[in-house]
Image (cartoon, rainbow, N blue to C red):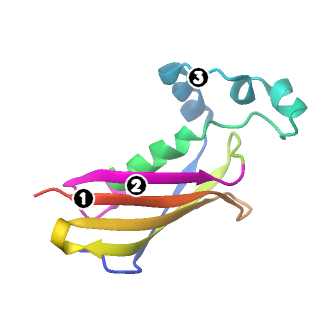
Amino acid sequence: MSLKLDDQIINNFVITPEIYNKFIALFEDRNPLHTDEQFALSKGFSGKVMHGNILNGFLSYFVGECLPYKNVIIHSQEIIYKNPVFLNDHLQLTARVNGIYESVGAIEFNYTFKNQVEKIVAKGKIQIGLLK
């Protein structure tokens, strides 16, 4: 299978306690917005806000495991955070092919992450290269 312009790939993720705890253990980011419930509530959030870079991990999974190619590398990646993500949120990643550049072996995707109430929590672009 090869991708065509406007093809979509959809994948679902959950921000589980295991993902959250392992992220903190690996990167030691203990910013109180992410780790202190009372602090997050005092700033107007409904709970601890998950680290935005957890979504980057989901994008890595998308590139490495969801594409019909295994010989890929990320050329560039942009992520714009639109709304907070919380523990146990269910996220749907929808990535649409918006450019195929055969001369340089690259494919570009626009993507969105939506939560369980269909609110966009992040969006952006990612370009991959097909390795020869």
Q: Which of the two residues, 66 or 75, is positioned nearer the viewer here?
A: 75
Q: Which residue is mark 3?
A: 29
Helix, strand or loop at disc 3? loop
Distance between the Cα atoms at labels 3 and 2? Answer: 24 Å
Indicate left or right for 111 with 126 as reference: right
Q: Which residues are magenta?
A: 65-83
Q: Which residue is mark 1?
A: 129
Q: Which residue is mark 2?
A: 62
Query: First in sequence: mark 2 or mark 1?
Result: 2
In the displayed image of the protein, which residue is found farthest to the bottom? 5
Around disc 3, counting alpha carbons within 10 Å, would you say few (fewer than 14), some (14 to 19), or many (20 or more)? few
Query: First in sequence: mark 3 or mark 1?
Result: 3
Which residue does the image show at 46% across and 42% down from the upper left? 57
- On the image, the x and y values in percent for residue 97 come to 39, 73
Which residue does the image show at 56% across and 24% down from the upper left? 24
Around disc 2, counting alpha carbons within 10 Å, would you say few (fewer than 14), some (14 to 19), or many (20 or more)? some
- On the image, the x and y values in percent for residue 87 come to 69, 39
Query: Is residue 72 on the magenta stretch?
Result: yes
Against 127, is 15 above or below?
A: above
Against 93, is 9 above or below?
A: below
- The amino acid type, in three-letter code, at marker 3 is Asp
- On the image, the x and y values in percent for residue 60 come to 39, 47
Helix, strand or loop at disc 2? helix
